[in-house]
Amino acid sequence: MEQVRQGVFARLFASIRLSFRMTAASFRMVRDFPKVLLLPLGTLAAVTVLVVAPLSLLMWGVEYHPGATGRFFATLYWVTVEAARNDNWSLAISSAIFETYLLWSLWMIPVLTAVLYFTTVGMHVATQQIRREQPDIRAGFKLANRNFGRIVALAAFSATVYAWVRYLVFQVIGMVPILGRIIMGGLRLVLTAVTYLMLPIVVYERAGARAAFKSAWTNVKKTWSGLLIGTGFVFAGSFALFEVFVWGLAAKVLGAAAAGIMSLIGAAMLYALASAVTAALRAVLYWYATTGELPPGFEQADLPQIAERKPFTVATAGPSPAAG
């Protein structure tokens, strides 16, 4: 048992070291074309609108049209309202939770669409750099626009899987909070790892979300799981250290309020950098997995061992990134 535990930790630390080298090499790609840092800011702007607009509309409705707003929510939660009127509080509570998860999953679709859309642009810019072409953000937007329907489908797939698995874990199965959070944390890691590969498969191989998920899941289990978990540790650690440093320094120099503002600004900047680097990392992983060619600036030691280099879905005759 001790040998097994040591072997697991050894593989984990090896994955973290490899992830650090890959992240550093991907950072150099972003440094060579810093305009891609504007793309994650576009993501933040889109997500902010999707959060602020519904809340603003709700507050406006409550203040100026409370009756219409109440009727709207009564219609939206009609099962809950009818159950409450009949004193069936068990049904009222369960239906309210179910409908809230349904609305949440629907709201996540445009949010994830925005994230995946801008990530596609950054990923394609990195692919241009790998092909030693002049990076062109407009070409990335054209690719994202051509695949917009597939991106929406991938967002819907991811939102549905995450929201309803969370619902099953916490509501249907009734997991205790600590165990439920552990399970959801593991699920988030798995979905992140699978999504890493799903996006380039959907965009470059023009596969559907279901086929992309099946192929990505198979390859994550075989090759990529430790690497992508290690990458997650690298970025999570960077966020944590940065926040602690910025908050501590600014709190001592400027006070708590200014520290909070600087922390938000710093977090946004770090998010932009991390998102740009992960978009480049997606392009690198997919290119290397499908072509076996070393991207510029990478060494063999920077990349994992790949037993078989080919497109992820059977229907594709060749690696589409090479064709643009």
Image: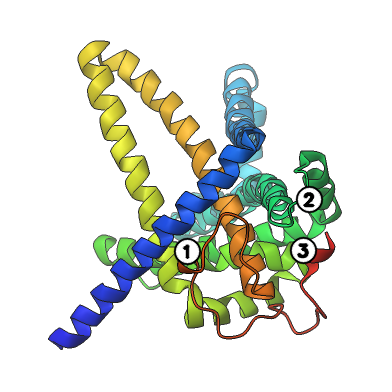
Q: Quadrant of the C terminus?
A: bottom right
Identify residue for label 1.
302
Q: Quadrant of residue 323?
A: bottom right
Residue in view at x 52 percent, y 45 percent:
27
Q: Quadrant of residue 185?
A: bottom left
Residue in view at x 20 percent, y 80 percent:
5
Percent coordinates x, y for residue 57 in the rendering:
64, 26
Type of amino acid under label 1: Asp
Residue 79 shows up from this direction: no
Type of amino acid under label 2: Ala
**Mark carried by residue 144:** 2
Q: CA distance from mark 3 to mark 1?
A: 21 Å
Q: Residues within 10 Å of mark 3 (few under 14, many from 20)?
A: many
Type of amino acid under label 3: Pro
In this rendering, which labeled residue sits more in front, label 3 or label 1? 1
Q: Quadrant of the N terminus?
A: bottom left
Q: Secondary structure at mark 3?
A: helix
Identify residue for label 3.
321
Percent coordinates x, y for residue 300 in the rendering:
51, 69
Q: CA distance from mark 1 to mark 2?
A: 28 Å
Q: Earlier in the sequence, mark 3 or mark 2?
A: 2
Q: Which color scheme is applied?
A: rainbow
Q: Residues within 10 Å of mark 2 (few under 14, many from 20)?
A: many
Q: Secondary structure at mark 2?
A: helix
The foreground one among 54 and 139 is: 139
Q: Which residue in the rendered view is the most extreme toward the top?
A: 254
